[in-house]
């Protein structure tokens, strides 16, 4: 699977894009479209909104590629733009529904211990994991995806979401507990589905 580290263009292509060459923009787009869509889909759990994030990210890159510093990682720059766009969509969805971004839950400093990767490691059934992730609140799903998959720190997540570091830590701990419970339920249900007489 192509990731953000795979969308590093060669300097000549980047220079052509800076000059406004539409073919260069298209080549760049093909390099980052899949990882941007995947990130947005996981955060938003809505393909239509993920497509909007992809388009918004593309527009932002075209507008700002001339100012991109070559000493920075292009994939990291694209990932940051896509993350900001996805979180903006998440925030706007919450505001449209009249909710706070914090999932209407108070921060719980006692739950701030991180358990990075303890849920995803050893999960053979990716469909079960996808179903479990979809059952999380949008903010919890965003924190899990950004921390466990994209490798953002709690400090970075807090800054992106406009929240405290303890918000990120508590959301992650709570989400990991929920995922463990949901995956355990899924494992209990799945054998029955495979062998109807075994339940």
Image: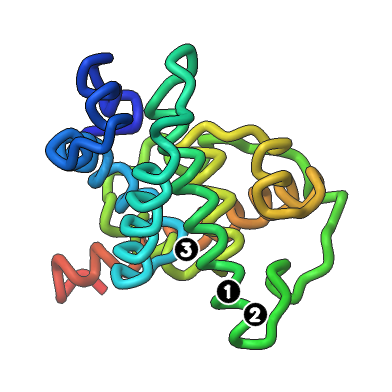
Kindly identify which residue carries mark 1: 92
Residue at the right extreme, as displayed: 109
Note whether 8 is above or below 159 in the view shown.
above
The quarter in which the N terminus is drawn is: top left
Q: Nearer the viewer, mark 2 or mark 3?
A: 2
One can see residue 82 in this view: yes
Which of the pair 181/135 is nearer the observer?
135
Instruction: Tell me the residue at 17%/42% (across/down).
Output: 22
Horizontal and vertical percent position of residue 45: 39, 66
Task: Check contact, mark 3 vs mark 1: CB within 8 A.
Answer: no
The reply, left or right, for residue 194 in relation to residue 143 is left
Horizontal and vertical percent position of residue 118: 53, 37
Residue at the bottom extreme, as displayed: 97
Mark 3 packing: few (<14 Cα in 10 Å), some, or many (20+)? some
Task: Give how far apart the Cα atoms at labels 1 and 2 are.
Answer: 5 Å
Which of the pair 28/196 is nearer the observer?
28
The reply, left or right, for residue 18 in relation to residue 138 is left
Which of the pair 148/26 is nearer the observer?
26
Residue 182 shows which numbered tag? 3
């Amino acid at each position: 699977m192509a990731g953000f580290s795979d969308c590093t263009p060669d300097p000549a292509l980047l220079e052509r894009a800076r000059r406004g060459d539409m073919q260069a923009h298209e080549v760049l787009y093909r390099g980052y479209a899949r990882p941007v869509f995947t990130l947005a889909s996981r955060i938003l759990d809505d393909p239509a909104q993920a497509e909007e994030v992809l388009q918004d990210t593309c527009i932002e890159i075209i507008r700002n590629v001339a100012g991109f510093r070559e000493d920075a990682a292009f994939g990291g720059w694209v990932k940051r733009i896509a993350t900001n766009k996805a979180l903006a969509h998440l925030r706007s969805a919450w505001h449209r529904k009249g909710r706070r971004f914090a999932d209407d839950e108070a921060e719980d400093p006692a739950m701030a211990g991180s358990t990075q990767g303890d849920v995803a490691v050893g999960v053979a059934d990716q469909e079960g994991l996808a179903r479990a992730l979809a059952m999380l609140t949008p903010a919890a799903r965003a924190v899990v995806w950004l921390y466990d998959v994209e490798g953002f720190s709690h400090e970075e997540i807090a800054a992106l979401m406009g929240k405290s570091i303890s918000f990120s830590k508590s959301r992650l701990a709570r989400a990991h507990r929920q995922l463990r419970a949901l995956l355990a339920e899924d494992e209990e249900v799945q054998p029955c589905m495979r062998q109807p007489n075994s339940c």
